[in-house]
Amino acid sequence: MKSTFLYTGVLMLLLNSIVGLILSSYDIFNWVVNDIVILLNTFFFIYLAVSNIKDGFKFGMSFLFVFLAIGQFILGLFMESVSNDNWLLIIMLVTIFIQLGLVLFTKSLSRYS
């Protein structure tokens, strides 16, 4: 399962990079932000696959993380190309920290069940 997430993440990263090189309207800032989003979400999925979290938690978190990843990618496409006063970047960072918090909370909760 972890190899599936790894291959999918690498393919998505390559696709995003190729599109970033081809399209002149795809700013470098947005391109790099979306590459980071793809890498972080790939690491989250791989961690879910290899961790000893209960399967029910893994299943639910995988669905939630897919929707959050799609939302983060869309935010990365439409955000301004500057980091100052960028509310979409702040929203994206908040969702990333929510993902991290959910992983840590579920890891600690899964130990007791």
Image (cartoon, rainbow, N blue to C red):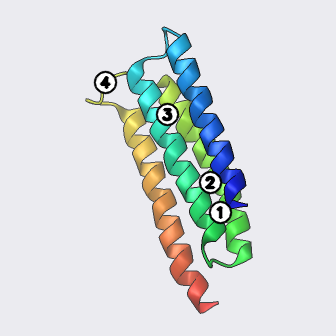
Looking at the image, tell me whether mark 2 or mark 3 is earlier in sequence order: 3
Q: Is residue 59 left or right of residue 34?
A: right
Q: CA distance from mark 1 to mark 4?
A: 31 Å
| Residue 87's disc number | none
Quadrant housing residue 14: top right
Secondary structure, mark 3, is helix
Q: Is residue 12 left or right of residue 20?
A: right
Looking at the image, tell me whether mark 4 or mark 2 is earlier in sequence order: 2
Q: Are marks 4 and 2 in contact (CB under 8 Å)?
A: no
Q: Are marks 1 and 2 in contact (CB under 8 Å)?
A: yes
Q: Residues within 10 Å of mark 1 (few under 14, many from 20)?
A: some
- What residue do we see at 49% from left, 35% from top? 35
Quadrant containing the N terminus is: bottom right
**Amino acid identity at mark 1:** Met
Q: CA distance from mark 3 to mark 4?
A: 14 Å
| Residue that extends furthest to the top in the rendered view of this protein | 24
Q: Which residue is the site of mark 3?
A: 34
Secondary structure, mark 4, is loop
Q: Residues within 10 Å of mark 3 (few under 14, many from 20)?
A: many
Looking at the image, tell me whether mark 3 or mark 1 is earlier in sequence order: 3
Q: Are marks 2 and 3 in contact (CB under 8 Å)?
A: no
Number of on-image labels: 4
| Residue 82's disc number | 4
**Amino acid identity at mark 2:** Phe
Looking at the image, tell me whether mark 3 or mark 4 is earlier in sequence order: 3
| Residue that extends furthest to the bottom in the rendered view of this protein | 112
**Amino acid identity at mark 4:** Val
Q: CA distance from mark 3 to mark 1?
A: 21 Å
Q: Which residue is the site of mark 1?
A: 61
